[in-house]
Each structure stands twice: as structure tokens, then as C-alpha cells.
Amino acid sequence: MRAFADGYYKNLKAMYDYLGVSYRPQRFLFNFLETTRKASGRGVGNASTYFTHASKYHRSPPFPPSTGTTIAHFVHIAYLFVCYVWFTLCCFYVPPRTSSNGVSETVDEYFKRIRIPEYFVAYFVFPMMSSVATCSHQSFLASPASDLTSYKRKTHGMQHYVVTNGVKEVQDKLAKGIACKLSASVLAVNLLHSVVQLSWRRTGGAVEGILQDSVFDRVVLAVPPDVVGRIFKPLSVEMANIPTVQVESVAHNDWNAYAWASGKQEDLRLSISSLYLRTSTADDYYTEATHVHQSGTIVTTSPLDTTRHW
């Protein structure tokens, strides 16, 4: 992981310390936007910013919107502050209920029980958390509330970090002394008596598509559960019970695709990394997360414009 929060990712942070991977504190600017564009719609669609928040409150007070009065803006901030304090207290002191077989109540059930305002949930909790979990708002509602409260407790007040020299530094240290084959797709893992057979093929170059078999003493499956079930049949049933979702993430520098962010580029690149959480309020609510790096690179996860090709 390039960016991570202390507290929730203690083991990751400890591994980076052990490997000597350098990381630094990172300030973020969270921009909450709303659009009526359907997740399956065409075109970018219009979007309007309804709130902007600076991490660790390094810029205060929060930036006023382009429309509305100053008084209304500060009333809105006061309302959000009260809601946030209540939400935080509940995460710390009102644990989610569990059934007799140890299953946690859902996020939807938990929010109804603590009576958190729907506006705060729909326009602030959902965009932030569903972008972290890379799922729709409805999927997030159906997830265990214990995951949400645990994440909040462990990250509350903690610093966010980014790897100083990029993820490649981490990869180089982890793979040091190991012969690596890149651009390879594993199709199957099979147990053959005391060894493991790996069926794979190149995904680029002159030998693309040629199936190859290699034998190893051990194989580590460091891939999502659905991929494990697909390539290693003995675990297919168990892995099918773990919900997963395929997520699209695109790295690009096409500012024309984000006209609603124009005019802010230079200011943001020079100071902090910006996150645009653009939520579609049509059909199944969904949040697109766009991370603008200081270098000018844009990373868009779960793009709402499914017809655009970068």
C-alpha cells in the first residue's frame, strides 16, 4: 500500500520499518461532490461540491461553497460537527450487536439503532467509507457494522502516511534475491504428490498466450479470494463464501475529464494531495474516488463514466 493510516495498519507500518522503507506524513483535501449521473450512464455529467474538508484540520475553517451565504455555511459546519461527534462516540462506546452465532449486525441496522441522521450518513459517511471499501452504498449498508466501528476506532486521530519513494521501493525490497517473471498470468495451481504445479502464460511479447507449466515445492497465493477459488479448485467452495468485487482503477492525467475540478490544479499540486469523492445519487448510490497527486497524476477508482477510455 502506498498510502495508509496509522493504527489500523500497524502490521504494515511495522513491516515498512523492518524493511527500511521510508514514509512521510501526508495531508489530504477531501472534496465531496454530488452528481445525478447514473453509475451506468454515459458522459461525465455535472457535479457540484457541497463540502470540503482538510485532513487533521490543517486548513480551517473549512472552505465555503461557491453558492450560499456564509451564515448558512457555518450552520452547516455546526450540524456536521454534532453529527460527527455523535457518530464517533457511538463507534467507541456503542458496540454493534452480535447474534448467538457471532454474526454482527449490519451497518444499516447499526445506523438505525444509534439514530444517526440520514443526511449525514448519505452525504458524508457513505462517500468516505464506500470509497475506502470500493463498493456501492447498498453493499456497504449490508456489510458488518463491526468492520466500520473497528476501522473508526483504530484510525481516529491517527496520522496518514505515504511511501516516500513509491511502491516500487517496497516491491524491490520484498523481491530482493528472488527471480521474478513479470507480465505472467497464472491459470491453475495443482497439487502433484509432494510438489505443486503452476500453469501460466505470458501476457505480452512474442510468446504471449503460450501455456507453460512449472513445478515448485511451495506456492503462495497472495491474491483475492475469488481468484484463489478460480485457480486452485480444492478451495473453490470455501472461497465462494467470501464476498469480493472487481474494481476498476485508472491512472491518467486527463483533466478534461474532470471539468468540475478545473481552476484548482495549480493550488492543489503545490500543497497537498486532493481526493474528489463524487457520488451518484441516481439508482444505486455509488461513489467515484479521484485522487489528484502532487505530481499532477490522477488516479480514478470506480469511475462513474463507464464509457470513457483513457
Image (cartoon, rainbow, N blue to C red):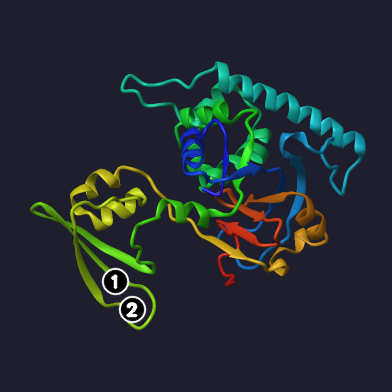
Q: Amino acid at mark 2?
A: Glu
Q: Amino acid at mark 1?
A: Arg
Horizontal side of 110 relative to 48 (left or right) equals left
Mark 1 and mark 2 lie on one chain; the one further toward the N terminus is 1
Task: Give the spatial CA distance, label 1 vs label 2.
Answer: 7 Å
Mark 1 and mark 2 in contact? Answer it, CB < 8 Å.
yes
Query: Which residue corresponds to the image point at 64% horizontal and 49% vertical from the top-left?
Result: 281
The total number of labels drawn is: 2
- Of 39 and 193, nearer the camera is 193
Query: Which residue corresponds to the image point at 68% horizontal and 56% vertical from the top-left?
Result: 292
Query: Which residue corresponds to the image point at 44% horizontal and 55% vertical from the top-left?
Result: 246
Q: Quadrant of the C terminus?
A: bottom right
Horizontal side of 109 relative to 160 (left or right) equals left
Horizontal side of 56 relative to 171 (left or right) equals right
Question: What number is the disc on residue 201?
Answer: 1
Residue 120 percent across, percent down from the top left: 68, 34
Return the residue at label 2. Answer: 208
Residue 210 percent across, percent down from the top left: 26, 77
Q: Secondary structure at mark 2?
A: loop
